[in-house]
Image (cartoon, rainbow, N blue to C red):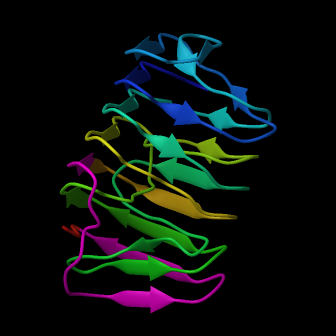
Amino acid sequence: MGNGLTTQGSGLTTQGSGLTTQGSGLTTQGSGLTTQGSGLTTQGRGLTTQGIGLTTQGSGLPTQGSGLTTQGSGLSTQGSGLTTQGSGLTTQGSGLTTQGSGLTTQGSGLTTQGSGLTTQGSGLTTQGSGLTTQGSGLSTQGSGLTTQGSGLTTQGSGLTAQGSGLTTQGRGLTTQGRGLTT
C-alpha cells in the first residue's frame, strides 16, 4: 500500500509468485512494462509493494527473490547470497536484516535492495517513503531478506558498489548504522 509510487524506465521486470500490488497514485513509464493495479509494474503472485513516494527509474531493472521484505527509507541492501559492499556496509547471506538511515549508494552496475527500490521475488514486500532508485541494469535478489531504514538513494548503471567499512556475513544477521555512504 502506498501512494506516489513511480516506476520509470524500459525493460523493467518484476518476477515472482504471490505478488500483491497495492497503492494509489502509482505511475509506470517506459516500454515493455507490465502495469497491474494502481499504475504499478508487477508480475506474478504474492508481491506487496507499499510506501509513499517510492520511485524506480532506469532500464532493464530485474527483480528476483523469495520472501523478501524491504521496509523504510534510506538504505541499500541485498540478501540471499547478494552482496552490498561499500563504504561502511557490506551485507551477505540469507534471511538478514539491514537497518539504517541516510544511506546512499551511487554507481553503475549496482546491486541494491532497500526501501522502495527494485524488488523481485515471491512473497516480496517493499515498504518505505520517498525512496529513489535510479540507473540501468539494477538488480536486486535475495531470499527472506528484510531491509529497514530511511532515505535511500541508489544511482548508477550496472555496477557493484565496493569500498571499505563494515562487512557482515551469515544468516539471520542484523546490521544497523546511520549516514552510511557507498
Please report the residue visible at 41 percent of the width from the left and 76 percent of the height from the top: 176
Looking at the image, how many numbered discs can be counted on the residues? 0
Whether 157 is among the magenta residues is yes
Q: Position of residue 29 (x, y in %)?
A: 38, 13
Q: Which residues are magenta?
A: 154-178
What is the quadrant of the C terminus in the image?
bottom left
Q: Is residue 126 above or below residue 105?
A: above
Q: Quarter-wise, where is residue 48 in the image?
A: top right
Please report the residue visible at 50 percent of the width from the left and 71 percent of the height from the top: 82
Q: Is residue 65 above or below residue 131?
A: below
Q: Is residue 69 above or below residue 30?
A: below
Of residues 128 and 76, the one nearer the viewer is 76
Q: Position of residue 70 (x, y in %)?
A: 55, 52
Of residues 151 and 14, the one nearer the viewer is 14
What is the quadrant of the N terminus in the image?
top right
Please report the residue visible at 26 percent of the width from the left and 60 percent of the height from the top: 159
Of residues 89 and 16, the one nearer the viewer is 16
Q: Position of residue 141 (x, y in %)?
A: 56, 58
SS assignment for the magenta stretch, majority: loop
Whether 95 is among the magenta residues is no
Q: Is residue 76 left or right of residue 163?
A: right
Q: Is residue 156 above or below residue 9?
A: below
Q: Is residue 129 left or right of residue 124?
A: left
Please report the residue visible at 42 percent of the width from the left and 39 percent of the height from the top: 61
Q: Is residue 66 left or right of residue 70?
A: right
Q: Is residue 124 left or right of residue 28?
A: right
Of residues 110 and 46, the one nearer the viewer is 110
Q: Position of residue 75 (x, y in %)?
A: 36, 58
